[in-house]
Image (spheres, grey):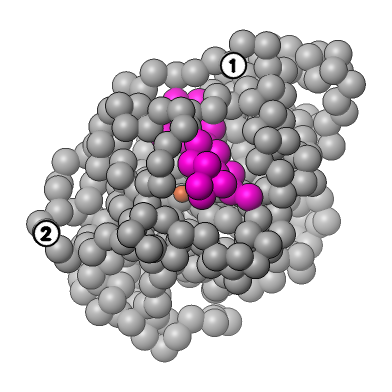
């Protein structure tokens, strides 16, 4: 199996299928679901307008000093985060935390995928075992409503594994916020074993938007090192393969309400392809297509197949997103097919 992981991680990866996690063996994290996707954008105002007025994601809060905006459906504090590209200039959080180094975020695209965990105890346990296994970790931070551990995958896609630390997050996050994020030491105190995600969320409907999504459900990554990426997301990421085709794998987390939360597609153009937002039903999808037509917005692509019905939109930076209704089964994708990322 081709792998770019270090020997220590490869050892952990090869043990991933063993039954019980211990200090050096995976799986490490055990996510409930994909909580949000965070994108770099060139113009916050322009992207806010697109994702709110066209796509129907509600603006929950802003962090002006970080040049960041957070939008969503209400299931989590945000389905979609957006940060202005850095232009090579460092950006700081609270207490001097170098939150966004100027070496990253130089162009629009994926900032990170964020995985919601059951509770802090599971997050800290995974963090401890990853350190024992010698897996390189990036920041550990306190977002005031969540604690997070950040890790790069083998393709250098950035992943946040987090637990909520406040159940009623709208009591903290609302409108224009001071800087939120500071350093978090996972070993500083005994972690909470309480699940603080909101399991009865107040959902948002953006009046007048063309599209009315229910929730973000998954992301699609293209990779030229499929086996190493699959190892990472199953062993480190703790996702399980729910369906497999020769050039694609559908990976699920623990929340039974989401059939899968990530699709890996084999291909030469490695990187983030799109995030997918679920609509309530096909009537809602038809209404969205009508509303887009009335506004003169042509979807990038429309897909109608046994597994799903979907349309794709390009945002002001050219980033792609999917708005879909799931049907039965999975796509059968010819290995190497150029259009595979649209069909999975
Ligand atoms: Fe995030």
Which residue, as the protein is rendered here, is positioned at the far bottom?
A: 7
Callout 2: few (<14), some (14-19), or many (20+) C-alpha neighbours within 10 Å?
few
Q: Quadrant of the C terminus?
A: top right
* Left or right: where 210 falls relative to 296: left
- Where residue 1 sits: x, y (%)? 55, 81
* CB under 8 Å between discs 1 and 2: no
Q: Is mark 1 within 8 Å of ligand 1?
A: no
- Seen from the viewer's position, the closer of residues 33 and 142 is 142
Q: Secondary structure at mark 1?
A: loop
**Residue 84's mark?**
none
Magenta span covers which residues?
62-84
- Where residue 129 sits: x, y (%)? 25, 71
* Left or right: where 202 falls relative to 226: left
* Left or right: where 51 falls relative to 116: right
Q: Quadrant of residue 184?
A: bottom left
Is 75 covered by the magenta stretch? yes
- Residue at 46% of width from left, 59% of height from top? 92
Q: Earlier in the sequence, mark 1 or mark 2?
A: 2
- Residue at 68% of width from left, 62% of height from top? 87
Q: Is mark 2 within 8 Å of ligand 1?
A: no
* Left or right: where 81 falls relative to 19: right
Residue identifier under label 2: 189
- Residue at 23% of width from left, 64% of height from top? 185
Callout 1: few (<14), some (14-19), or many (20+) C-alpha neighbours within 10 Å?
some
Spatial separation of the CA atoms under disc 1 and disc 2 = 40 Å
- Where residue 284 sits: x, y (%)? 66, 14
- Seen from the viewer's position, the closer of residues 135 and 319 is 319
Q: Is residue 321 above or below residue 103?
A: above
Is 181 covered by the magenta stretch? no
Q: Quadrant of residue 131?
A: bottom left
Residue identifier under label 1: 206
């Amino acid at each position: 199996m081709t792998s770019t992981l270090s020997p220590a991680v490869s050892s952990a990866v090869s043990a991933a299928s063993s039954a019980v996690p211990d200090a050096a063996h995976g799986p490490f994290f055990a996510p409930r679901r994909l909580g949000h996707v965070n994108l770099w954008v060139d113009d916050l105002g322009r992207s806010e307008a697109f994702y709110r007025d066209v796509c129907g994601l509600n603006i929950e809060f802003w962090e002006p000093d970080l040049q960041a905006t957070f939008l969503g459906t209400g299931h989590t504090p945000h389905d979609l985060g957006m940060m202005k590209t850095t232009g090579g200039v460092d950006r700081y959080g609270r207490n001097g935390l170098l939150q966004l180094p100027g070496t990253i975020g130089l162009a629009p695209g994926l900032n990170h995928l964020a995985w919601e965990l059951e509770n802090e105890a599971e997050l800290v346990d995974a963090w401890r075992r990853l350190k024992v296994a010698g897996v390189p970790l990036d920041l550990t931070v306190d977002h005031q409503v969540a604690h997070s551990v950040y890790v790069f995958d083998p393709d250098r896609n950035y992943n946040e594994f987090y637990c909520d630390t406040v159940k009623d997050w709208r009591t903290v996050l609302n409108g224009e916020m001071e800087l939120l994020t500071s350093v978090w030491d996972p070993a500083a105190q005994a972690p909470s074993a309480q699940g603080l995600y909101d399991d009865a969320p107040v959902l948002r409907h953006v009046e007048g938007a063309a599209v009315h999504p229910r929730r973000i459900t998954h992301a699609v990554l293209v990779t030229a090192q499929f086996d190493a990426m699959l190892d990472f997301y199953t062993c480190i990421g703790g996702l399980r393969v729910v369906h497999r085709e020769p050039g694609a794998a559908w990976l699920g987390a623990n929340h039974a309400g989401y059939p899968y939360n990530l699709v890996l597609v084999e291909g030469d153009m490695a990187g983030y392809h799109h995030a997918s937002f679920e609509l309530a039903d096909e009537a809602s999808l038809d209404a969205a297509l009508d509303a887009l037509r009335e506004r003169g917005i042509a979807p990038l692509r429309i897909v109608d197949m046994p597994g799903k019905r979907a349309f794709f939109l390009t945002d002001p930076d050219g980033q792609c997103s999917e708005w879909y209704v799931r049907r039965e089964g999975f796509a059968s994708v010819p290995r190497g097919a150029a259009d595979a990322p649209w069909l999975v």
